[in-house]
Amino acid sequence: MTQLSRTQSTFTPPVPEAKRWIEGVSFPADRPLINVSQAAPVDPPPAALRRAMAEAMEQPETHLYGPVLGLPALRIALARDWSAHYDAEVSADQVAITAGCNQAFAATMAAIAGEGDEVLLPTPWYFNHKMWLDMQGVRTVPLPTGDDLLPGAEDARALISPKTRAIVLVSPNNPGGVEYPAETLRALYDLAREYGIKLIVDETYKDFDSRSGAPHDLLRQPGHEDTLIQLYSFSKAYRLTGHRVGAIIAAPGLLEEVEKFQDTVAICAPQLGQIAALWGLENLSQWVAGERDEILARREAITAQFPRLEARGWRLKGLGAYFAYVEHPFAEGSDVLGRKLVHEAGILALPGTMFVPPEDPAGARHFRFAFANLDADAITVLFDRLDALDWPLAGTDSPS
């Protein structure tokens, strides 16, 4: 029997799979599709940034290969920004620029883990992290979270083995939306340091954290460079999803290994995207603050709307950044109900089964709603449609 390749053995990407659910489906003008399946801004970058990008297109160097670890000016600017935000000393040689944050994760894992190694991922997890580990031949060890969707250090301790290479966290969390408390991050950092493994913190959504100031003090810990790796994305802050610009903040020695991956896979992150990210860092701090305020307002709109779903048996498990992670009250699983939502409610959302191992029953009870592209009025319509669902409830034989 022919052995399957790593990609053949890896599950289908959830977002493209969900998008196929709407193929051939018509949505009337007075009841358009509400798409809460993907955490990506649909609006273009602000006009001033688009003008800067148009000017950059006229520069010959924009169309050439750049340095493998990123434009020096961008690395310097991000190091300066990171230092100010975290009240810590970060230098440019601790910054690498990648073709998006997914590549930042892939490059990092390629640098620290190999065939048969293990990595702890809290569940529900970000599915692309799981996919890459599968394709790299690294075993994913699910780290259960509590009802608050937060992982515990002692639970993690029980799962660490001699093959463990890292604990991976996302905060603010995708898919759960929760903002990890500083003490949670510190406890897992201390655990990683105790065992000589890496703590990887994906901070893609840091610009939309509801807390002011630094969300943790890990960069101020002596010797943190031996343990801590941070990942970041410019895509959300500046609406540059199609231009693929991410970053790794880590020890220079680790970035030397990342450089091997980068040079082989992409050579460099797209030049135009890097130029745009640099311009954004230098000119758009007030604009990003306004974007954060708008996301926080949408979060508040969900908080205000949720009691009417709660009265029908729904539970809001996590809310923050771009995401609401909700438990539904229905008898059927979310993998089945996801398709029904398209046809009966005009809603495209990802079921919780896409964020947990197949054997985890919790997935069938949950949905992730990515609300970043919904204003307050659209959020009201979303809740109107969810409130109107009259499906059989768990533990009953007929609709309520």
Image: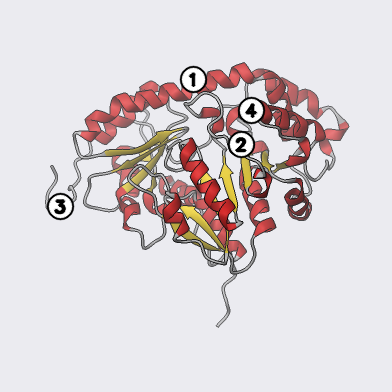
Q: Is residue 280 above or below residue 217?
A: above
Q: Is residue 181 in view from this perspective?
A: yes
Q: Which residue is labeled 1 in the image?
A: 293
Q: Is residue 360 above or below residue 20?
A: below
Foreground mark, 2 or 3?
Answer: 3
Q: Which residue is labeled 2 in the image?
A: 241
Q: Which residue lies at the image location 81% right of the left edge and 35% below the top edge?
A: 72
Give the CA separation, mark 3 to mark 1.
Answer: 41 Å
Q: Is residue 291 above or below residue 261?
A: above
How would you rate the neighbour count of disc 3 (Cα within 10 Å): few for under 14, some for 14-19, many for 20 or more? few
- Report the residue that reaches farthest toward the right: 60
Foreground mark, 4 or 2?
Answer: 4
Task: Tell which circle, 4 or 2, labels the residue nearer the N-terminal end.
Answer: 4
Foreground mark, 3 or 4?
Answer: 4
What secondary structure is marked by label 1?
Answer: helix
Give the CA separation, mark 4 to mark 2.
Answer: 28 Å
Task: Tell which circle, 1 or 4, labels the residue nearer the N-terminal end.
Answer: 4
Q: Which residue lies at the image location 44% right of the left edge and 43% below the top edge?
A: 175
Q: Are marks 3 and 4 in contact (CB under 8 Å)?
A: no
Q: Amino acid at mark 4?
A: Asp
Residue 233 drawn at (x, y percent):
62, 37
Foreground mark, 1 or 4?
Answer: 4
Q: Amino acid at mark 1?
A: Asp
Foreground mark, 2 or 1?
Answer: 1
